[in-house]
Image (cartoon, coloured by chain):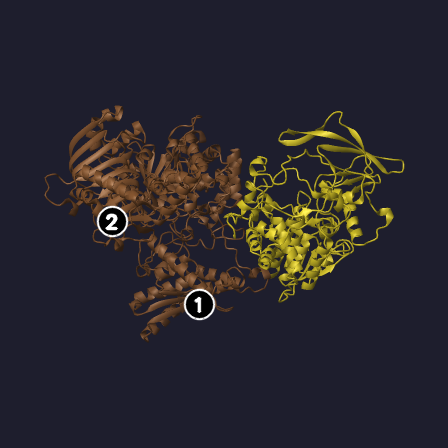
Amino acid sequence: MKARIEAIREEVTKCIADGATIVVLSDRGVSKTMACIPALLAVSAVHHHLIRGKDRMKCGLVVETGDAREVHHFCLLSAYGAGAMNPYLAFDTLHQMQREGYLPADLPADKIEKNFIKAVGKGLLKVASKMGISTLQSYRGAQIFEAVGLSRDFVDEYFTRTASRIQGVGLETIAEEMLKMHEHAFPRTKVPETLELDVGGQYAWRRKGEAHLFNPETIAKLQLSTRLNSREEFKRFCDLIDHQERQLLTLRGLLEFKKSANAVPLEEVEPASEIVKRFATGAMSYGSISKEAHETLAVAMNRIGGKSNTGEGGEDPIRYQLDPNGDNRNSAIKQVASGRFGVTSNYLVHAQELQIKMAQGAKPGEGGQLPGHKIDKEIGRIRHSTPGVGLISPPPHHDIYSIEDLAQLIHDLKNANHHARVSVKLVAEVGVGTVAAGVSKGKSDVVLISGYDGGTGASPLTSIKHAGIPWELGLAETHQVLVKNDLRGRIVVQTDGQLRTPRDIAIACLLGAEEWGIATAALVTVGCIMMRKCHLNTCPVGIATQDPALRAKFAGQPEHVVNYFFLVAEGLREIMASLGFRRINDMVGRVDKLDSRKAVDHWKAKGIDFSEMLHKPAVPPHIKTYCSESQDHGIEKSLDMTTLVPQCQPAIKQGKPVTLNLPIKSLNRTACTILSSEVTRHHGPAGLPEDTIQLNFTGTAGQSIGAFAVPGVTIRIEGDVNDYCGKGLSGGKIVVRPPRVSTFKAQDNIIAGNVVLYGATSGEVYLNGIAGERFCVRNSGAKAVVEGVGDHGCEYMTGGVAVILGETGRNFAAGMSGGIAYVLDRKGSFPTLVNKEMVELEQLTPADEKEVLRLVRRHAEFTGSELGTEVVENWDALKSKFVKVMPVDYKRALAEMLASEQKAENVAAGGKPAAKLAEVSRG
Amino acid sequence: MGDVKGFLKHGRKHHGNQPPEERVRHYQEFMVLLPEAELRTQGARCMDCGIPFCHTGCPLGNIIPDWNDLVYRGQWREALDRLHSTNNFPEFTGRVCPAPCENACVLGINEDPVAIKEIEMTIADRGFSEGWIVPEPPLERTGKKVAVIGSGPAGLAAAQQLNRAGHTVTVYERADRPGGLLMYGIPDFKLEKAKVQRRVKQMEAEGVTFRCNADVGGNVSAKKLKEEHDAVLICAGSTAPRDLPIPGRNLKGVYFAMEFLPQQNKRNQGDQLPAETSIMATGKDVIIIGGGDTGSDCTGTSNRHGAKSVTQFELLPQPPDLGYFPRAKDRPTHSPWPYWTMMLRTSSSHEEGCDRKFSILTKEFRGDEAGNLKSLVCCTIEWYQENGQQKFREVPGSEQEMPCQLALLAMGFVGPEKKGAIAELGLELDPRGNIKCDAEYRTTVPGVYAAGDARRGQSLVVWAIHEGREAARAVDKHLMGVTHLPSTHAGDFAAR
């Protein structure tokens, strides 16, 4: 194969010298005597050859191959140089499928190909967007991949400058594998069955197909052992898993524990009841999974002192009260993801840990997706969204574009609940160590390194197999970087991604994690049988469904989960004893206890080299290698702790009105948030009566003023405000106006930074001036009046009202699935600035007019706005200039809700539908 | 999966049966089949699980969700191909298999499982009725000769696979007709013999030679066979019955089930049996000792003979009666879903009239002066645990004498018969008395292989087919260096 690749390279060079401008690489000639070179290898080999010879710009590279059929294949071909691809075998297969009746007979042949190309194109676009790339030109040759299991020489030669950290096989093994496939295609003897296609089993387990760690045997054993609480059965489960792992299913499967000369007696190892506190379950939202499943996990984890995770779907406040039997359904970890669904002050104060999900191991670069049919009334209520309307979390957090922004969010959350630790969830990928160092410097208390094989049955197919890398690599890198930079001692490192057995946990610990997340296995103990139908709402065991009939079938018990974690902890203790560790903390990062020398005799494991992964940084003894101190969040020095909370005690304790007049400056970040959290702690989500606490600031407020401010807290700023004003607003009121002494025209000047009201759930904001970009992004309930906004206004909004009395930037209402915006469009230019993918532009109804006028009146009253006053005074002339931006789905859902409510009421009251619609839409 | 919500919309349906009083008047199959449309709807109940536990429940690893869906879509031909890719004889398993696949069906956790067995049978029958099942002789011959001893399901499966791999296969059967247990063990009313014969015909057309009345180790020399062939594969079954050595065992009227059952199958084939050796249940009080499938077959046959009464004894206590398709939550703790459920199973033969007694021990057969059985003495026992072992003792005063003119011993089989081929070839046995083999189905004598009940002990037809296929693969690999015959692959639920 090597010789042929060289020959191809020479041929291409010659062709170019002869003036060819397009080179086509083809594997059409496969025959009984001719096997093929993998298309990706051929393309990349030529691509890099041409780069080296400075010829790459002289020709286009086209590949004609039978290899490419999945989106990932096309991504790879493109990322390694192909400018065009012809997947002829995929087309042939589709035509055959039509002949065999798998596709409609009346579909024209070219339409089939067109559909396939369209699907692949969309997939490519989606993958590129996950990687933050907007055009195919930028994606081509971008090589945004990491190789796992390829030798350095091979990668250097053919996939130059691709990361490949554990080495592995080279050309010989790849050729060997190609010959095996060729033999399958052209068998020496013809047995009918051998002509049957391989059953595959990549995306769903098949007995003869690709091996999966969770399969009927292992699932059955895990369920049996945890129901019986049988160590013997659990041991069998672990043996099955650990044995399979050694069959090249995981990197950890290739590692062995080094025999220790100084084993310690089992009874000297710290007790299982302590170890289980280091376990967490995964971030699976209520919505993705049923109430029953979600609460079962929460109850179990609270019983053992571990942590369950809300996922990014909010949580019903009723769960903050203990059950009569003392069980606690409150999830210890409250996740804060890009969608900010249901992230209110009340939600945050009831957490022990606040987890910022930067990305998900199973689908890096993507936000969560919840299809509309899984969003019933209940889930809509908790997420502050509209039932029946699908929710897509945006890929990025709109308040994080840099590591400083992340530090700000960490600070915001620490203020929203300073008793909770803050955690940042990252995905294992090359370079994650650097990000983790930033996270530690940004004062996160915990960093979670999430591996690629973490499960979500609802992950898009393009993400399941090839996005992300094993946690082993990410974790090792993270631990090493943190230790080298003396940042490890003040941050807890957690890892997750298909951990199942004590052996898995022990290896995670030795590679540097002192806490561990287990999601899929925990779900299996409560009955999950990995249907991989989580996105269809048809889970037959009542877990990943909201269908009441199916939910009734849920049979999981917290006891089973408790049993599972204790069984794991007991098994871990045995390993600890054998390795000579009495405490988990002593074990963290002790890679010297891992042996990779035996690394398997499998033909495809040849050349694996773990030395980089098992490197132990040489640091002086005072450098901590596990978390032993806490971060300094500077909370004590904040305006809230020094001034606001002490002075507002009468309001917090007794509900008495307090008014404070204070200066403010940009150093005062996240002002009023701790105060709000105290109000929530004492008064619950309803907070205090309007204007109980009145804070009158003068000056320039720092970032995130009024973040998660609650009812009863009114913040007035005379001056201006920085970015993230009113982030996560939870019922409070924020009024910003220029200094009374200023002479400029307020409506022409910027008064607030970017991303005002991001993730707000309720409350009001009045801005006497123009706000920056992404105004009201992901707002799901707050009402705001502003005199102009920058680009991307009302992006991803799902509820609430925005009244904009001036001009907007472009891309207004992108991804907006709920709520209403009213824009005063005096020039008539607004429609060109709207992203109409999900919204329609309408005229105001009488009910709308009433509401807009009410809000503008308040705006004028609170801010003294000249523009507001003008609009109120000229209402009759101006009202027709308002444009109503209405999301299509939202409108439909409101109409449906109205219809069903009216049905219920049986038109007894005889309320007017239009008025009712307006009422519902405001509610 | 054609309909993601199919399982929510449709309940389980499968074939009905003729009423017992009607069906006991003949020996034919008595199913009343579902109309095609309804069967296709049953296919829609399959949920196309991310992890189809049925694959593992089935010893053949049948790719069940795939053909369920094809049936739902009406693509019968493709369904047949997919089914045949793992199972040589779906028309047999579709009738006589206890369907461990359905026991492990994910839908079975909370609902009646998918009617997998019904769908399997229908696909196979349709294949025959449409003329899709035709001989598939190999394109080229390897020149290697293989002898298969025994033509039961293991032997047939092995022979078909080996032949398709191009070897020249001769099957040696000691009975007068091929089929082994399928021919002479299972009654016609469960599996009509024409269905066995049409498969044998297919295999003959493919080039397999059947030699009946050839008792290897008896009238055919095993050693000679070995010399004449490149490999010998023993699929002779587990045919040595467990005996009941109690007083009166030699009375006329006490027989092994496998003396009784084959006779009726012969009669159904039109054979005339001499009156003096003919065993009939007509007008007799029949007691069947042994509560398993063979006992159940004796029940059905006795009722068709017109027995006066039919009683079936089982030594073990009655397992819990959980209906036909118990939900996961109702299954016993130690045999939970998806493992094989320990529960009372009522066969169609039981429904035809049978008094089933559990925890019962037979102590003595009593006869008249002429040596004819006239009664038996039995007692009730109670089971208890001692040192982790199950033991039983008699319940005092429970002894009773029951009228009985025909007693049939259906107490299982202790392994292959030791005289004959095993003795002649000098094969080693395992501790359980079966032919000792390594993982590659090789016996202790080079060139001699064993599979099926002869190797694993008495088991199901579906296991026999599995064994035959896997052994064929092993033999092919041994003969050719490589094999292209498919394997089921590991992945069965390990015995708990």
- The residue where tag 1 is placed is A27
Q: Is residue A739 left or right of residue A57?
A: left
For marks 2 and 1, the one nearer the N-term is 1
Q: Quadrant of residue B233?
A: bottom right
The residue at 86%/38% (across/down) is B372
From the image, state the color of chain A: brown
Q: Is residue B428 visible?
A: no
Q: The chain shown in yellow is which?
A: B
From the viewer's side, name the closer residue of B180 and A478: B180
Q: Chain of mark 2?
A: A
- The residue where tag 2 is placed is A880
Q: Label 1 amino acid? A: Asp
Answer above or below: position of B211 versus A702. Answer: below
Instruction: Where is residue A413? Give x, y as percent.
Output: 28, 37
Q: Is residue A588 left or right of residue B100?
A: left
Instruction: Where is residue A425? Give x, y as percent.
Output: 34, 42
From the viewer's side, name the closer residue of B145 and A297: A297
Answer above or below: position of A53 versus A733. Answer: below
The residue at 86%/50% (across/down) is B274
Is disc 2 placed on a helix, strand or loop? helix
Is disc 1 placed on a helix, strand or loop? loop
Q: Chain of mark 1?
A: A
Q: Quadrant of residue B158?
A: bottom right
Q: Quadrant of the C terminus of chain B?
A: top right
Q: Is residue A858 left or right of residue B115?
A: left
Q: Label 2 amino acid? A: Ser
